[in-house]
Image (cartoon, helix red, strand yellow):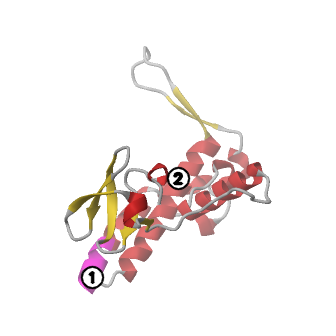
Amino acid sequence: MKIEAMHLGQRVRHPQHGTGIVKAIAEHAAEVQFDDGVRRSVAPDLAGLQPAETQAELSGLALPLAQLLRETAEATVAALGVENPRAVVTELATRWRGGRLVLHPADPALQTKEVELEVFFHKIVVVRNNLRVLEQKINGHEGLSSAEKFDWQQYITRCYGSLTTFNVLFKDKEGQF
């Protein structure tokens, strides 16, 4: 492995010392903190150091870069569970589409706050979806007793109850709290 191909934090594998993390890089050597707890200075090309992580090389890729980046971004967004605010608008009742939420402070000298209802609704749906995921994780958690699961479930139920005010925004009852 060439020293130019190394970066800080990279996991590497040494034939005798096993795997470790690159902590510093000099002109001809790298400081590696090995999994056995010992920090060693090694010359990567002489010591037979290899990347311990899967490497990717994109040269010769027969795919337009824009397409690769778009597909990578879409896969990342899907893996993170991030939703587009416009995607949940289908759950918003028709009469609220294009509307605005206006908050007026008690002090008339202060400025009002306006938010598009689609954006506000998206935030409400994200809270709902996160509560559902939390509920599933609690119910499926093997380390919690039945009594603990019941206690945690009560908190989630109370959160749902507090959010029922926003049910008026939903088109269908299935999406409500």
Spot the residue most to the top.
109
User: The magenta stretch spans which residues?
Assistant: 144-152
Tell me the SS state at disc 1: loop
Residue that badge 2 annotates: 124
Is 145 or 176 nearer to us in this picture? 145
In reply to whether residue 149 is colored magenta, the answer given is yes
- Mark 2 and mark 1: Cα distance apart in space: 30 Å
Q: Give me the residue at 68% from left, 49% from top.
A: 86
Coordinates of residue 37 in the picture (x, y in percent): 19, 66
The numbered mark, 2 or 1, whose residue comes first in the sequence reads: 2
The residue under the point 47% across, 69% down is 132
Query: Mark 2 falls on what kind of element?
Result: helix
Q: Residues within 10 Å of mark 1 (few under 14, many from 20)?
A: few
- Decide: is 106 above or below 172: above
Q: Which residue is mark 1?
A: 143
Question: Which amino acid lies under the numbered mark 1 shown in the image of this protein?
Answer: Gly
Name which residue lies at 38% across and 69% down: 13
